[in-house]
Amino acid sequence: MTVLPIRTSRASGAGHPIHPLLAERFSPRAFAPTAIRIDELRSMFAAAAWAPSAFNGQPWRFLVGIRGDSTWEAILGSLDRDNRRWAGGAPVLVLNVARVTWNGSAVSTATYDLGQAVAHLTIQALADGIHVHQMSGFEPEHLVDFFDFPAEFTPVTVMAVGRLGDPEGLPQDLRVREVAPRERVPMSTLVFSSTFGKAAPWISDTSI
Ligand SMILES: Cc1cc2nc3c(=O)[nH]c(=O)nc-3n(C[C@H](O)[C@H](O)[C@H](O)COP(=O)(O)O)c2cc1C
């Protein structure tokens, strides 16, 4: 599949302009040690809380670790080796949890809803100059034991939260990735009208 590099700001708005917050968002690995204020955290989680969800079920839960506390340490300790190389630089680490069963039945949209809440949180954070890097590379069992989860809840992702740091502080291979252009597949491979796989007529390959 062709991958188009994006070169203007963090994302191109050349063909289909998008909001500057969406264009500027990316998943950094270099974080500044600056603490995130409590009012900023409150706004982030309020944004998540106002996300839509199936039947307004709001199946998301968040365990927030602030550097120096036991939640932050536990989340860091659950990360895989690659993520642990950089995520310890983040002043806040969050475990994102979904309620995947309700009254004994599986909730098929729970992780979808959680992801949407995290997307809202991410953009609210960026409006306050704070970046979010989501991760699936962690050991959920480690955290289920640590936090003693109720059975209907399951850890889904972790996120590192903080202000941008200096990429020079990263190991060489991660520094290269930090400043590389973001890439996306062409819009023509994503958006169809009458035939699956055939680009909608109003989509152009050069406009991502
Ligand atoms: C569900 C999910 C899991 C991810 N897991 C990891 C991870 O374990 N480690 C990592 O470095 N990045 C992880 N990422 C970040 C993606 O690699 C990143 O979003 C993608 O490469 C696009 O880059 P961008 O966010 O800068 O646009 C994850 C993102 C999502 C949404």
Image: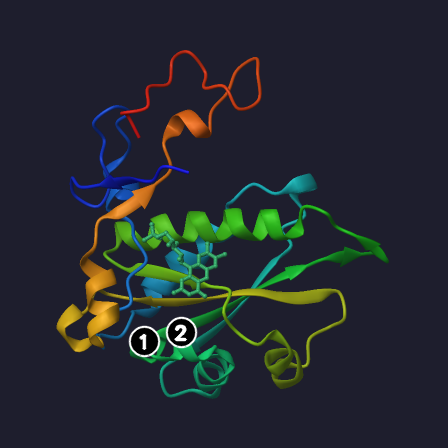
- Amino acid type assigned to the residue bearing label 1 in the image: Trp
Mark 1, residue position = 86
The label on residue 50 is: none
Report the residue marked by disc 2.
83
Q: Quadrant of ligand 1?
A: bottom left
What residue is rendered at 69% in x and 75% in y?
A: 149
Instruction: Report whether the residue tagged 1 is closer than 8 Å to ligand 1.
Output: yes
Count every numbered label the image shows and give the total. 2
Point out the image quarter for the C terminus: top left
**Disc 1 vs disc 2: Cβ atoms closer than 8 Å?**
yes
Q: Is residue 37 above or below residue 202?
A: below
Q: Quadrant of the N terminus?
A: top left
Q: What element does badge 2 sit on? A: helix
The x, y position of residue 79, in whole percent, is: 47, 77
Horizontally, is 92 left or right of 55 in the view?
left
Mark 2 Cα shell of 10 Å, populated few (<14), some (14-19), many (≥20) = some
Q: Residue 126 vs residue 75: left or right?
A: left
Q: Is residue 30 visible?
A: no
Amino acid type at mark 2: Asn
Up/down of 104 relative to 10, above or below? below
- The residue lying at 75 percent from left, 65 percent from top is 152
Residue at the far front in the pictured view: 1
Q: Position of residue 130 (x, y in %)?
A: 27, 60
Mark 1 burial class by Cα count in 10 Å: few <14, some 14-19, many 20+: some
Judge by depth and name the residue closer to the eye, 7 or 42: 7
> What's the residue at 29%, 70% (across, down)?
36
Secondary structure under badge 1?
loop
Q: Residue at x 51, y 64 (%)?
A: 136
